[in-house]
Image: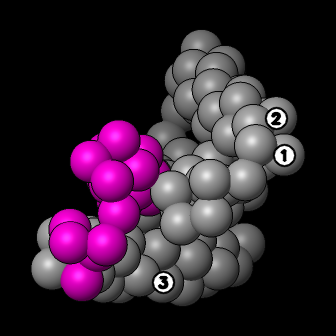
Amino acid sequence: MNHRWMVLWGATLGATGVAAGAFGAHGLKNILLPSSLNVWEIGVRYQLIHAMMLLILFALAQLLDSRLIPRAAQLMAAGTLSFSGSLYLLAFTGSKWLGPVTPFGGLLLIAGWLTLLYAGLKIRKMA
């Protein structure tokens, strides 16, 4: 099965995560309050961690016969967009309506990790 999308999303999230980190460190440090800059940095951290995770899941999907691995990747990609994206908007705008979006993204990330755990328990042989 073709799981190329995992590499594309992982690379896109990785590149934009590095750019967001640099932007925060150099472009926003004199603009945002320290608390907002901290929120921005948390978004960057989670984005980069899960960008790498998508690449790892792509490699696992090539080696292991499990439909759960791509499902975990889907959950992590959606969770990263929701979690980190809402933190970036929150840092920039301070909009309180974003409050529920961040935990929802976090739940998607947790669901992705738990799906991977379940996949690990179900795997019996190498593909």
Which mark is on residue 97? 1
Q: Nearer the viewer, residue 113 or 63?
A: 113
Amino acid type of the residue tagged 2 in the rendering: Pro
- Answer yes or no: is residue 114 visible: yes
Amino acid type at circle 3 is Thr
Instruction: Tell me residue 55's x, y (percent).
Output: 41, 64
Query: Considering the numbered disc 1 on the image, is that residue within a helix, a strand or a loop?
Result: helix
Q: Residue at x 33, y 53 (%)?
A: 33
The residue carrying mark 3 is: 12
- The residue carrying pointer 1 sits among few (fewer than 14), some (14 to 19) or many (20 or more) residues within 10 Å by Cα, namely few
Question: Is 44 colored magenta in this rendering?
Answer: yes
* Disc with the residue nearer the chain's start (2 vs 3): 3
Q: Secondary structure at mark 2?
A: loop
Q: Position of residue 97 (x, y in %)?
A: 84, 46
What amino acid is found at the position of numbered circle 1 in the picture? Trp
**Total marks drawn?**
3
**Where is residue 93 shown, x and y percent of the image?**
62, 64
Q: Where residue 100 is drawn, which disc sits there?
A: 2
Instruction: State if disc 3 and disc 2 touch (CB < 8 Å).
Output: no
